[in-house]
Amino acid sequence: MVTMSETENIWLRLTDISKHFGAVIALEGLDVAIRLGEVLALVGDNGAGKSTLVKLLSGAYPSSAGEITIGGAVATIETPSKARQLGIATIFQELALIENLTVYENIFLGREMVRPILGLPILDRKKMRNRVMELIDELGSHIPSSGALVSELSGGQRQAVAIARAIDLETKLVIMDEPTAALAVAETRKVLKLIEQLRDNGKAVLLVSHNLNDVFQVSDRIVVLRRGRKVAECAKSETDVEEVVSWITGGKPGPQMRNPVTKRPKERD
């Protein structure tokens, strides 16, 4: 349940965001705020604009119009590396893990820890392995060894590796795109527990999912997109699966702001 005030802990805010691909309108006039210590679920049918929004936040696409603020300051997310610098990590459905590398090699790929020996930088494998196990313990996950090959891990364990790689970048917002797709029931439970752990650790989580059972298990707030527009936003405790489905399909008009996050007042001249 969301217990914080409407404006408390807001870390990222989208104001009147639009994205056009020529004559095609993928997003139009989108207002969304994301809080630290909260799981915000983003739901909608295919073509609703969910993937476009994820790509805007991850630095793959620029917006056509609107404003993004992070920590109260206007921000431009030009590239994926810029998104990471700003504290945004995106975990796509395809986890982009290298199966023939170990857990710690995947987590530190491209940013390996080194130590000097005779003036030469040598990989500090022990330090990396120890740090990985700290991260895994922080998530409450169970991975046999930081030296295990990713190919030997289950689906839930692979999600844990992807999350550990993200949170080791001092990430504030973790975007998870269909994290339980194609997972068995037991593995799904593990991933949902990881999401709850991220929230409990003070991260903001944007959960993009078609699985409303998952959404209602872990989310605090739900935003519904339809044809590129936000048609509903409310606390999970104020709705149910049937009502959310009706908003997604257009069978019932949704409240634009049943539990609104107040916009910043415009500055007076």
Image (cartoon, rainbow, N blue to C red):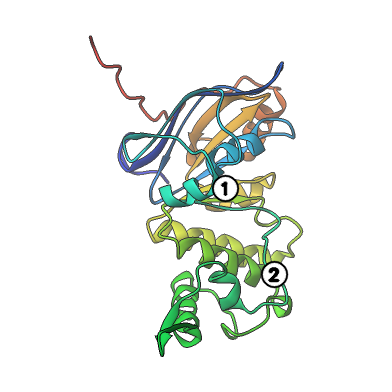
The vertical placement of 86 against 129, above or below, is above
**What whole-number distance in Å separates the C-alpha atoms at marks 1 and 2?**
24 Å
The residue at 51%/38% (across/down) is 78
The kind of residue tagged 2 is: Ile
* Mark 1: secondary structure: strand
The mark lying in front, picked from 1 and 2, is 2
Is residue 104 in view from this perspective? yes
User: Image quarter for residue 182?
Assistant: bottom right
Horizontally, residue 231 falls left or right of residue 4, namely right
The mark found on residue 98 in the picture is 2
The kind of residue tagged 1 is: Leu
Q: Quadrant of the C terminus?
A: top left
Q: Residue furthest left?
A: 269
Work out whether residue 162 or residue 1 is closer to the camera in this orientation and state it. Answer: 162
Work out whether residue 257 or residue 49 is closer to the camera in this orientation and state it. Answer: 49
* Mark 2: secondary structure: loop
Is residue 87 in view from this perspective? no
**How many residues crowd around disc 2 within 10 Å: few (fewer than 14), some, or many (20 or more)?**
some
